[in-house]
Amino acid sequence: MGMSISFDNSYARLPEGFFARQAPVPVATPGIVALNRDLAAELGIDPDALTAEVLAGNEVPEGAEPLAQLYAGHQFGNFVPQLGDGRAILLGEVIDTKGNRRDIQLKGSGRTPFSRGGDGRAWLGPVMREYVVSEAMHALGIPTTRALAAVTTGEDVIRERVLPGAVLTRVAASHLRVGTFQVFASRGQTDALRDLTAHAIARHYPDAQGPLDLLSAVVERQAELIAAWMSVGFIHGVMNTDNMAISGETIDYGPCAFMDAYHPNTVFSSIDQMGRYAFQNQPNMAVWNLAQLASALLPLIDEDDDKAIELAEDRLHAFPDLFGAAWARRFRAKIGLTTEEPGDGALIQGLLSRMAASQADFTNTFRALATGDASSHLTDAGAWDSWAPDWRARLERQGSDGGAVMRAANPAVIPRNHRIEEAIQAGVAGDFAPFHKLNDVLARPFDDGPETTDFAKPPRPEERVMRTFCGT
């Protein structure tokens, strides 16, 4: 192996209470489904060093210090004092070709001391879904963890039925979560909390002067991130505090989905009975999660509780304006606006409410503003004609038709649920061609080509996927 992966493992240098040292559990017969050679190059890793044995956890590369990270979290609003990596192993960290530190983690790599009764494994479906969706998000320019590889294990896992096992290699700026702070705060381990805060600041926000600045920086990143999600119709599905990364990357693609027909209350996750994580609720949930981070940081902010709360709340209160500005910036671009006017919000909302009434396809309606006939997407009589004149007048006032701006802001293709399902079904049957094809098309989401046209089609009624499931 030699120097093919140069590890520099800062998390492993934290005190022992932060993790459990744990090697991945070997599998029967690993086979590579996909290897992201471009990402390997960006990480400064020789792709040929990434054998099926390494990617499945059968062979631990030199310099890796495998461990399972400890964290807690609120799951659907209920606090679970200890979660931790129950089926993932952090192999270590590399400094990539741009000088950024990145985690390399195996997901589905066997039981750990934090497993809580699960088998520590993943099946092929969720591994393929995360690979497709996280790489598509990256191509859309949205901060996200990345997929370096997907491998099959040659072993079955038992869920509702017998399914083929798989392991995903995930790359992240870090795996520090709101829940990582919560675990030490809930145990009253202020020294550990201090170490963690210093680690997070050094790693992600070197300009931050202490816990309040860290909180502000995370608030800012999350406001930008959620606005980006909203602008492409993305629904995370499980915004628990253990699924919110301090780095501002999208993390943990479980029952995630992109909307087809637009409705603000859309929910996909099979476990979200109450619609807590519905599309429109995502900004509120981000604030809820950030409040948990603020609360965990209180002991470091001020010895006087009331003063600490006041200072933290002040930083949290920045979210609505930051989110509103990020949302307005993205949606202005989606309708071709390059300047700002007070009436823009009402103009954008006017289109969205008409789209909701028509159950218009979110992606295709916005794309058609620049490249086709958007009026055909609004089926309600008069819906288009009561909106379009104001829009055209607004474009005229700015002196440009906004076409280029719209084409750059409105993807032609997104990872549609029915296409992902189709790729998974084929993959389970041993045919990975649809999976590779889907990844190829989604790597260029703003292109208009013959291939794009086919993948841009919304599902037919019988193809609609109404529910998505957690991979565990």
Image (spheres, helix red, strand yellow):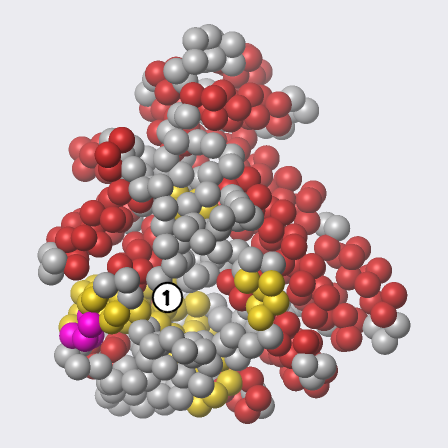
Q: In this figure, which residue is indicated by the disc labeled 1?
A: 472
234 magenta-colored: no
Side of 199 where 85 appears, left or right: left
Q: Decide which of 10, 30 is in the foreground and name it.
A: 30
Q: Secondary structure at mark 1?
A: loop
Q: Decide which of 409, 20 is in the foreground and name it.
A: 20
| Rendering quarter of residue 154 | bottom left
Which three-letter amino acid code belongs to the residue tagged 1? Thr
Residue located at (37% from left, 20% from top): 377
Residue located at (69% from left, 84% from top): 189
Image quarter hosting the C terminus: bottom left
Q: Decide which of 34, 24 is in the foreground and name it.
A: 24
Mark 1 surroundings within 10 Å by alpha-carbon count, few (fewer than 14), some (14 through 19), many (20 or more): some
Q: Which residues are magenta?
A: 152-156
Q: Position of residue 3 (x, y in %)?
A: 29, 86
User: Measured along the vertical axis of the image, is residue 37 above or below residue 447?
Assistant: below
Number of numbered labels in the structure image: 1
Q: Position of residue 124 (x, y in %)?
A: 24, 63
Residue located at (72% from left, 66% from top): 295
Predominant secondary structure in magenta? strand
Side of 452 where 20 appears, left or right: right
Side of 330 where 322 appears, left or right: right
Q: Is residue 371 visible?
A: yes
Q: Decide which of 46, 106 is in the foreground and name it.
A: 106
| Rendering quarter of residue 338 | top right
Residue located at (69% from left, 76% from top): 185
